[in-house]
Amino acid sequence: MNLNYKEVPVDAVYSLRHQVLRPAQPLSSCHYKEDKEDSAFHFAALNGKDVVGVSSFYCEPNANLPDGIAFRLRGMAIEPSLQSHGIGTNLLTQAIDICKKAGADLLWCNARVDAKNFYQRIGFKATGGSFNLDGIGEHYLMYRELI
Ligand SMILES: CC(C)(COP(=O)(O)OP(=O)(O)OC[C@H]1O[C@@H](n2cnc3c(N)ncnc32)[C@H](O)[C@@H]1OP(=O)(O)O)[C@@H](O)C(=O)NCCC(=O)NCCS
């Protein structure tokens, strides 16, 4: 499959974000308040016109992490029938380059327990114990230094 990885408008990420990450909640739960901030960008994998992978990034500090300009990753989701084919790795690796060009020193996320290995393989470290996010489940704070 020949996928195209590129920045997309936020409207392009909502459907897959909802289907994969919050199917039991209303679509409005997938409209994050940070989505339209000036620093926000949304990065997707496309198969033709079909959006098959999504991720979103914002400049957002985290007091529990080392100093520096921090970007946050949210809404990382791959179309279910295409998971475990390397698309998430390609998507995140390319988006990290954009974060670096935007001046980020580190990238962090609240990672679902099930996705911990995926992030570790891309160089993220977990810090602290797991914690519960309402309605979504157990997570780890994970980050990767970009310098
Ligand atoms: C987590 C998620 C974003 C990862 O994306 P992905 O495209 O499935 O990830 P990759 O294929 O790049 O890597 C995942 C696995 O496939 C394996 N893999 C990587 N490239 C592969 C390839 N070419 N062929 C087969 N398997 C491959 C990796 O070893 C990895 O194994 P792991 O499950 O132990 O981590 C995706 O599975 C997903 O959307 N999951 C549900 C939602 C979710 O949990 N999102 C994260 C919220 S924090």
Image (spheres, rainbow, N blue to C red):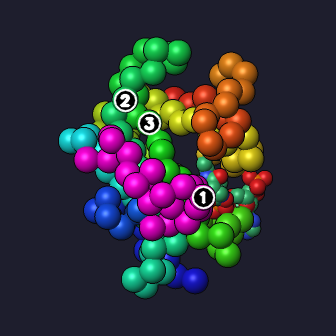
**Mark 1: which amino acid?**
Ala
Q: Is residue 32 visible?
A: yes
Name which quarter of the figure residue 112 lies in. top right
> Which element carries disc 1, helix, strand or loop?
loop
Name which quarter of the figure residue 128 lies in. top right
Circles 3 and 2 in contact, beta carbons < 8 Å:
yes
The picture places residue 58, in percent across and down from the top left corner, at: 35, 39
Q: Is mark 1 within 8 Å of ligand 1?
A: no
**Mark 2: which amino acid?**
Glu
Q: Sequence-wise, which precedes: disc 1 or disc 2?
A: 1
Is 16 displayed left or right of 39 in the figure? right
List the single residue furthest toward the left.
38
* Residue under pointer 1: 24
For the residues labelled 1 and 3, the Cα–Cα distance comes to 24 Å
Depicted 85 relative to depicted 90: above or below: below
Q: Sequence-wise, which precedes: disc 3 or disc 2?
A: 2
Q: Quadrant of ligand 1?
A: bottom right
Q: Residues within 10 Å of mark 3 (few under 14, many from 20)?
A: many
Depicted 61 relative to depicted 114: above or below: above
* Residue under pointer 2: 60
Residue lying at 33% horizontally and 41% vertically, measured from the top left: 33
* Residue under pointer 3: 72
> Which element carries disc 2, helix, strand or loop?
loop
Q: Quadrant of the N terminus?
A: bottom right
Write down the region rendered in magenta: 15-36
* Residue 43 magenta-highlighted: no
Depicted 144 relative to depicted 7: above or below: above
Residue lying at 49% horizontally and 77% vertically, measured from the top left: 3
Q: Residues within 10 Å of mark 2 (few under 14, many from 20)?
A: some
For the residues labelled 3 and 2, the Cα–Cα distance comes to 6 Å
